[in-house]
Amino acid sequence: MANYDSARARERMVQQQLRARGILDRRVLEVMAAIPRELFVSEAMAAQAYQDSPLPIGEGQTISQPYIVALMTEALHLDGDETVLEIGTGSGYQAAVLSRLAARVYTVERLPTLTRRARDILERLGCHNVIVRQGDGTLGWREFAPYDGILVTAFGPDVPPVLVDQLAIGGRLVMPVGSQGIQELVVLEKTKDAVERSTLGGVRFVPLVGRFGWERPRNNRN
């Protein structure tokens, strides 16, 4: 995909898929209009990179549709000074978006092949404030906690308590929760006295595999 065509496709994506559906955060819209999404999919999929749907990235995983990336990112309410934890690096696209909106991004991927690939792409893009590691994301990354924002890109039966523990007071956590057939995008906001919970509607994601998720992969999509 030529650079000119890619830029036009990104602008159409922002206008038709994001702004038209209520994504209003100016910084989120600007970042998603700038990051070349086609770099995070195979060459064979490059022409489809900006379509309104998830795409396969190998290992039974997907890159989320642009609207879901924007919705989850906007829900974190980032202003640029935050430390953010992402669970489920996948292609690395969500981490690239977060890298332009937060001060520091730590991201954990279960699958070694995807970990290496995402790390390489993020380095090529100059996302030097992103640190990628391979491991069980359901355990979080306690070394750098607490986090101002936590974003989980796979669905679990509920939010792992260990992730809530690693969330800072005043921080927000966004994660799809539910069963294989029915999932809701949950937002937790941690206050000094409680954890407030709200939802952003129904979604479809790949499963969160690990100690505090599902024991084995299930077929799904996001």
Image (cartoon, helix red, strand yellow):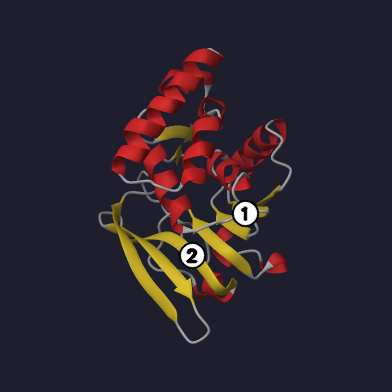
Q: Amino acid at mark 2?
A: Leu
Determine the residue positioned at 45% across, 83% down: 194
Give the residue at mark 2: 173
**Of the residues under marks 2 and 1, which one precedes in the sequence?**
1
Q: Secondary structure at mark 2?
A: strand
Q: Say whether residue 104 is left or right of residue 69.
A: right
Give the residue at mark 1: 80
Quarter of the image that includes the C terminus: top left
Residue 107's x, y, as percent?
Answer: 62, 52
Residue 63 or residue 23, whichever sits in front: 23
With respect to residue 151, does 139 lie above or below? below
Q: Say whether residue 47 is left or right of residue 52.
A: right
CA gap, disc 2 to disc 1?
16 Å
Residue 115 in view: yes
Determine the residue positioned at 43% across, 69% down: 188
Residue 92's x, y, as percent?
Answer: 58, 40
Residue at the farthest bottom position: 193
Residue 166 or residue 110, whichever sits in front: 166
Q: Secondary structure at mark 1?
A: loop
Q: Amino acid at mark 1?
A: Gly
Do callouts 2 and 1 mark residues in contact (Cβ within 8 Å)? no
With respect to residue 154, does 164 lie above or below? below
Task: Classify residue 128 by image quadrant.
Answer: top right
- Badge 2 crowding class, 10 Å Cα cut-off, few under 14, some 14 to 19, many 20 or more, is many
With respect to residue 42, does 80 lie above or below? below
Q: Say whether residue 186 is left or right of residue 80.
A: left
Q: Nearer the viewer, mark 2 or mark 1?
A: 1
Task: Classify residue 15 by image quadrant.
Answer: top left
